[in-house]
Image: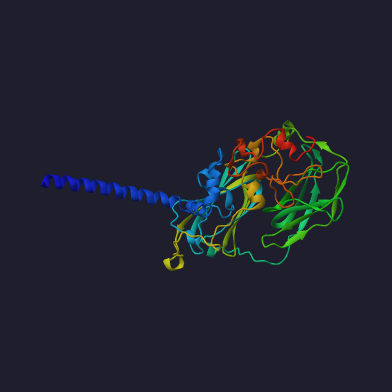
Amino acid sequence: MRIFDRIDQKKCLVLLGLALVVLLWSLALSQNDEVESVCVSCHQDVYEEGLSNSYRHLPFEEKQCEKCHLKQSSAGIVSPALSREILQPVVLTYPEYLAEHTILLRGLVYRARYDITIIFKDMSGNQVKKEFKGVVPENVEDIRRDDKKPPKISGVEVSPVVKGVFLETTITWETDEPSTSCVEYGFSALYGRRTPEDNALVRQHSVNIYELEGGRQYHFRVVSRDIFGNEAVSEDLTFNTAKTQPLPSDIEKKGVDKTHDRRLAVNRAETFLLNSDLGLYLETTEPSSVTVEYLKVEEPSPEEEPQVRAVTISEDDHPELRDGKALAIDGCYQHECHPPEDLGVSHPVGIGASEKTKVPDDLPTLEGGVLTCVTCHFPHGGSRRYFARKEITRDICISCHEGY
């Protein structure tokens, strides 16, 4: 009997050990999935509906809600209510190819110390890196305050009108401080049309206007807002679409590129403080996408650090969400997803319907009838290839283009 007792004891110890291993492993997995599970727990009906699709968007299927829905400046940021020890760098991606980037790192601990690495990548794949070591937000000397003054606009120019898929032109201008970009235009000084505001804060501005009518004179003005919302508006200007030229071919574009210095370098990289957010102003010799990695390398004293460990997210500490153009266009164009240079021929987005087109109610648009990627594609998945809302044949074209 004693022999059997010893055997039973060993079996119990083995089983207990296995149970402990399984428990620890499940706890480790739950730590990694904590944020994602919170998203799904609040939107379980949306997730279950998406799983019923024949084709599913991979980030949705893997519960990577933050990849598309969180703002670029909030992506990867853990709010105080979700705080936990950060062992890996937080990685933020800014896929648009711009010569200037103004980035705000939100949610940093004011007295903690951070190492920041910035990787720039141009359209040819060239990369350069810039590093800031031991940055403490509290010690940053450049503190931005609202001076109540709008940006100063100068150098407004109109590019030649070209004929591509649509009749189009490009408006460029400069401002004395980083600010947003928008153009109001129409057949009179009342305008009536407005391009979607590009919220990228830059000094060198460029906005494309599509679906122009031939042989008409257009009135326009440019609008820019600084980081505090102070708005500047240019005087009324005009351009004419009577003269057009064909869109440059790929060969012509390459010929221009050969005469241009393609060396990628960093002109300016500055830190500043805006309220409690750490700002980065970055300027490069060539338009580039940006990846920012930051790691907390030194904690403040324990009494200065928030101790809340609850998982529930309130409205006050919920990370900022993308909306509008940032969600339905920029989120799709992230360079690890669907960058424009990899899409080939694609229907223009960020434009409104013209008098010759009418977008039906079952194809969603932004305010003002602005087309986005989501206009023709379901974001979470669908029953058709490419998550298309309608069959990718003549059917989807004639939905908007009558007589196609």
Image x and y of residue 232, in percent: 76, 60
- Along the line of sight, the residue nearer the viewer: 326 or 301: 326
Instruction: Tell me what residue is drawn at x 46 percent, y 65 percent.
Output: 306
- Along the line of sight, the residue nearer the viewer: 378 or 106: 378
Above-or-below relation of 36 to 257 = below
Count of numbered marks: 0
Q: Residue furthest bottom?
A: 303
Q: Is residue 293 visible?
A: no
Image x and y of residue 166, in percent: 78, 39
Instruction: Indicate how the structure is coloured in the image.
Output: rainbow
- Along the line of sight, the residue nearer the viewer: 156 or 331: 331
Q: Residue furthest top?
A: 251
Image x and y of residue 300, in percent: 45, 64
- Along the line of sight, the residue nearer the viewer: 37 or 87: 37
For the C terminus, the image quarter is top right
- Does residue 320 appear to the left or right of 302 in the view shown? right
Q: Is residue 175 visible?
A: yes
Say which quarter of the image contains residue 342: top right
Image x and y of residue 332, in percent: 62, 44
